[in-house]
Image (cartoon, grey):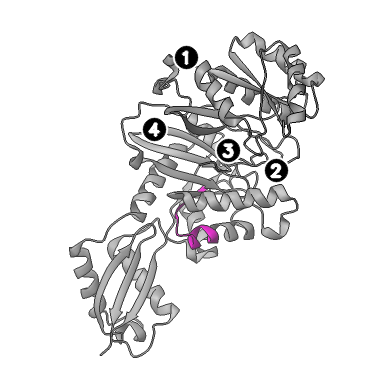
Amino acid sequence: MARRQVLVDAAPGLTRDRLYGEIQWRGVPFQVVDTGGLEIGAREPLARKMMLQVEKAVQEADLCLFLCDAREGIMPLDRKVADWIRPFGKKILLVVNKVDTETQAPAIHEFSALGLGEPVGIASLHGLGVGDLLDQVVERLSASSFPRKRESDPRFREDDTQGEAALIRVALVGRPNVGKSSLVNRLLNEERVLVDETPGTTRDPVDTYLTFQGRRFCLVDTAGIRARRKLQTKIDKVARLKTSQTIERSDVCVGVLDATQGIVNDDLKLLDEVVTLGRALVLAVNKWDLAKKGLTEEETAETFHRRAPFLRFAPVVAVSAKTGYQVPQLLDRAAWAASQANRKLTAAEKERLIEVLQNDRKAPVGVRNMGLVWAAQVGSAPPVFHFVGRMARPLSDSDRAYLERVVRGLLKWEGTPIRIRTLRRKR
């Protein structure tokens, strides 16, 4: 089934990073990589970084699809790109897009002048000719390419011996320029995603896979999120929507904060969304190398938790993408938080929880008078607890908050939001 995985818009330069996707056609699985548009000879730092990303994608590829625009015809830049790609010695399939009508079909043959073989006409927006294109892709790739050897797959850094069920999806979220992409690159020890001082460099969520200490991770670098009132363009709004969708699909979020700025209102609004969606959470205080001298990690965590009490369950890790300080610990904490989100209440823990609450003389009046008769965990990711009692009236928000504190303190249940529901049993 087709799905929209990358941002699409008429504005040039929308795609910047290498975006990977999995395809299966006629029983043959393969990987496609969407790259940014090439600007041969560009001098701007960001454009040059984009070109390096394209070069890496070409070097990794078994087959390159050279895409042209039927409506514009052969452009000078098309010829420059053709001359640029030939020395790589890769198999090339010339694809002419936007062939929307039969009258446009003859025009595709002029692209043969690029010297890259017979062109294939498609209209990607409407899906016309895409099946024929995929047939040619499968035919042109040699049998030795299937399946692609795992050790040559650029997304994996160690042998993959675990199943898909063990994959932990980690979304890095935060404001622009807090260092999300830099953290991903530091974890991978390569320039996998673009890093630039220009706000909004990352637009599409970028998935990258690695294995660390025997556990498989999918790191998802998301667009820097501003407050909704600050979203000015359609691209900004769509990027924010895709980030929200990425949060919802993740197992755990790493909320990246700037050590030099502390936690600000835009951070709070984004992290509140993470909690509302019930995702496990780790707070990464990046740029620790630039933090105030003498400041401790414990002091920073306490400051953040005072500023945002609803985040007290989230561990705080001071890191530096620049120096590598404590960056690997992020994966350890993320795996731990994901396990907490999927943790199951044992029979012994349930009995202990009920006993403590039934005999808690320091509890709020509402909790003491609830007449607790039963408690159970009824959901995971996030954990959901039901407390059933003979209460005369519904418990208040502060009463439910107290029940949550007991669960966390008694059972050491942190790293994830918890849902508390109270049910009234008829007398």
The picture places residue 359, in percent across and down from the top left corner, at 23, 80
Q: Earlier in the sequence, mark 2 or mark 1?
A: 1
206 falls in the magenta region: no
Q: Residue at x 36, y 85 (%)?
A: 366
Amino acid type at mark 2: Pro
Q: CA distance from mark 1 to mark 3?
A: 35 Å
Number of marks drawn: 4
Q: Residue at x 58, y 49 (%)?
A: 243
- Closer-to-camera residue (281/319): 281
- Closer-to-camera residue (160/291): 160
* Residue density around tag 4, few if under 14, some if 14–19, many if 20 or more, within 10 Å: some
Amino acid type at mark 1: Ser
Q: Which residue is mark 3?
A: 181
- Closer-to-camera residue (84/100): 100
**Residue 326 appears in view:** no
Q: Which residue is mark 4?
A: 211
> Which stretch is magenta?
272-284
Q: Which residue is mark 2?
A: 199
Q: CA distance from mark 4 to mark 3?
A: 18 Å
Q: Earlier in the sequence, mark 4 or mark 3?
A: 3
Q: CA distance from mark 2 to mark 1?
A: 42 Å
Q: CA distance from mark 4 to mark 2?
A: 30 Å
Secondary structure under tag 3 reads helix
Amino acid type at mark 3: Ser
Q: Earlier in the sequence, mark 1 or mark 4?
A: 1
Left or right of residue 298, residue 89 in this image: right
Labelled disc at residue 142? 1
Q: Earlier in the sequence, mark 3 or mark 2?
A: 3
